[in-house]
Image (cartoon, helix red, strand yellow):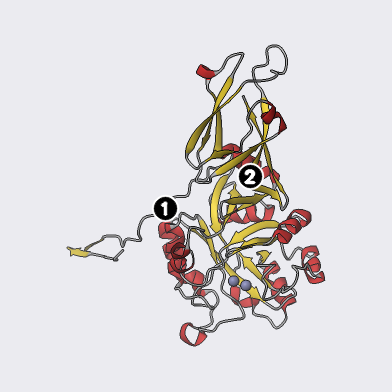
């Protein structure tokens, strides 16, 4: 959309009509009790390293796509455009901050510690001064991030350029973990999912992250090249603020949404499913012989439910598709009601697109 700004100067009064940034496409993923569900991307590049866009455009893209929080994380040690834009690693944040404030998008100051494997690349967020991470050896860069109170996560741990054969965890990562200098790991980067990293995250209590690592424009890399959208890190934050996001990331309150699948710890995915899908008894169609309920999906995420053994026994045999923003009705003729006076019949289902571990899907109970 063409930008316009009209200035009217009348008797010392300046009125300015707003420049237009195009409409925001809201993402509907409900809050869970006690937490805001914030949609974030914590890994992106600008012209201040090897990206193709100006920092402010990252903010506009993210706002238009419905995101709530982003971090600009240019490479600390790799600045191919420095002859044109200088080498102050805090500039991307500074140049994007006003636009983020105007649009109500949370913006986090960050940088990518870009080293060979091990330990590979890591993002440091909530930095005070990114320039101080430009150190001769990588240990000092992590120590400085720790000194600044940063949240640090290992990027693209299965990236073929650095892990050509198998995705390995190195002793260096163990040391960083023991020193409290890494707290998270990307299980999704750009268009890749790393099941090994998901298993490590669960085992070693690392925060689960999924980010775009975008270098070109969002239009060029995602929108124009098919239906797969940028990965999102869903952050469950007690308050909608940079501090709120920081606490949530440090506590591990996240899940990842990528290509229609959700990945996360059981407790969070369970709460998220309960927030997304409402269950209501259809009284008119329920009696002693039959029980009917409405299942309503309030979210933008399509769910597929696979009936468990008890559901099958009660004639719910086929997978149930529960598309975004839709309601389905389910009826069972209960084989057993669980004793006199008990009207509810709990039946177990597996949510086909919610992963609580690489080989394990979320189990939910639906009450008839
Ligand atoms: Zn990287
Ligand atoms: Zn990167």
Above or below, 250 relative to 83: above
In the rendered image, the residue lying farthest to the left is: 11
Image location (x, y in percent) of residue 123: 63, 68
| Residue at the image position 61 percent from the left and 13 percent from the top | 288
Image location (x, y in percent) of residue 173: 77, 68
Ligand 2 has an atom within 8 Å of the beta carbon of the residue at disc 2: no
Lateral position of residue 218 relative to residue 199, left or right: left
Q: Which mark is residue 25?
A: 1
Dot 2 falls on a residue whose secondary structure is: strand
Q: Quadrant of the C terminus?
A: top right
Distance CA(mark 1)–CA(mark 2):
26 Å
Q: Quadrant of residue 15?
A: bottom left
Q: Quadrant of residue 198?
A: bottom right
Image location (x, y in percent) of residue 155: 66, 67
Q: Which mark is residue 351?
A: none
Ligand 2 has an atom within 8 Å of the beta carbon of the residue at disc 1: no
In this view of the protein, can residue 340 be seen by the observer? Answer: yes
In this view of the protein, can residue 34 be seen by the observer? Answer: no
Dot 1 falls on a residue whose secondary structure is: loop
From the viewer's side, name the closer residue of 64 and 367: 367
Name the quarter showing ligand 1: bottom right
Image location (x, y in percent) of residue 250: 67, 56
The residue carrying pointer 2 sits among few (fewer than 14), some (14 to 19) or many (20 or more) residues within 10 Å by Cα, namely: some
Q: Which mark is residue 352?
A: 2
| Residue at the image position 69 percent from the left and 27 percent from the top | 313
Q: Which circle, 1 or 2, is nearer the viewer?
A: 2
Q: Earlier in the sequence, mark 1 or mark 2?
A: 1
């Amino acid at each position: 959309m063409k930008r316009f700004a009209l200035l009217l100067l009348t008797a010392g009064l300046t009125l300015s009509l707003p420049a237009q940034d195009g409409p925001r496409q809201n993402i509907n993923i409900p809050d869970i009790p006690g937490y805001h569900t914030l949609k974030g991307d914590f890994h992106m590049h600008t012209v201040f390293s090897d990206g193709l866009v100006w920092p402010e455009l990252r903010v506009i893209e993210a706002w238009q796509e419905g995101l709530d929080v982003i971090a600009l994380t240019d490479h600390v040690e790799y600045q191919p455009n420095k002859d044109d834009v200088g080498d102050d690693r805090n500039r991307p944040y500074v140049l994007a901050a006003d636009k983020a404030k105007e649009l109500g998008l949370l913006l986090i100051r960050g940088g990518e510690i870009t080293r060979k494997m091990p330990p590979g690349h890591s993002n440091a967020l909530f930095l005070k001064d990114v320039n101080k991470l430009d150190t001769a050896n990588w240990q000092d860069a992590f120590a400085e991030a720790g000194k600044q109170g940063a949240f640090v996560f290992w990027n693209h741990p299965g990236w073929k350029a650095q892990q050509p054969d198998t995705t390995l965890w190195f002793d260096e990562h163990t040391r960083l973990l023991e020193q409290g200098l890494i707290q998270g790991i990307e299980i999704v980067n750009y268009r890749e999912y790393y099941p090994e990293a998901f298993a490590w995250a669960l085992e070693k209590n690392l925060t689960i992250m999924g980010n775009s690592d975008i270098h070109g424009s969002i239009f060029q890399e995602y929108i124009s090249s098919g239906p797969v959208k940028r990965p999102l890190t869903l952050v469950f934050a007690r308050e909608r603020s940079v501090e709120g996001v920081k606490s949530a990331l440090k506590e591990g309150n996240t899940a990842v949404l990528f290509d229609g699948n959700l990945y996360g710890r059981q407790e969070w995915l369970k709460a998220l499913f309960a927030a997304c899908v409402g269950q209501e008894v259809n009284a008119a169609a329920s009696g002693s012989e039959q029980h009917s309920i409405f299942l309503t999906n309030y979210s933008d995420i399509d769910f597929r439910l696979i009936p468990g053994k008890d559901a099958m026994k009660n004639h719910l045999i086929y997978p149930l598709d529960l598309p975004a923003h839709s309601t389905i009705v389910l009826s069972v003729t209960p084989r057993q009601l669980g004793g006199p006076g008990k009207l509810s019949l709990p039946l177990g289902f597996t949510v086909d697109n919610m992963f609580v571990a690489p080989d394990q899907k979320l189990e939910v109970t639906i009450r008839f």
